[in-house]
Image: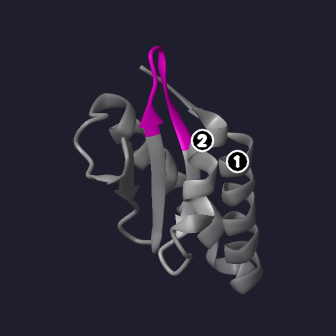
Amino acid sequence: MRVRFSVAARRDVVEAKTWYQAQDPDAALDLAFAHELEQVVEQIRRFPTAFPKTFLDARRANLSRFPYGVFYVRRRSDLLVLAVLHHARHPSRWQQRYDTNR
């Protein structure tokens, strides 16, 4: 099943990568974040129902090294990532995206 990112989720990823790059450019944390995100997205693609529901039918898959969650919904023909957010962010930050992307 294909995984798509909403515009807001793509923006979340850019913001996170930019933040990690600014922390220590030599550590390549932005690349490590992107790599782990790719791995989690592949797990979501292969096992879309393996992750817990968090809001209505939206699910969350957590990154292991970074404190981020990938919030997504299963649609008829694809999986849509609504948000990629730090665990400290309030849930309303991504829940408002639910209705606009269904």
At horizontal 37% and vertical 39% (from top left) the residue drawn is 44
Q: Position of residue 71 (x, y in %)?
A: 47, 51
Q: Residues within 10 Å of mark 1 (few under 14, many from 20)?
A: some
Kind of element beneath mark 2 = helix
Of labels 2 and 1, earlier in sequence is 1
> Farthest residue in the top direction?
77
The amino acid at mark 1 is Arg
Q: Image quadrant of residue 50?
A: top left
x and y, in percent, of residue 82 in the image = 57, 46
Residue 102 spot, x, y in % from top left = 57, 32
Query: Relative to residue 55, is residue 26 depicted above or below?
Result: below
Q: Which residues are magenta?
A: 73-81
Determine which residue is flagged by label 1.
10
Q: Which mark is residue 99?
A: 2
Percent coordinates x, y for residue 57 in the rendering: 36, 41
Query: For the view shown, which residue lies furthest in the left direction?
Result: 50
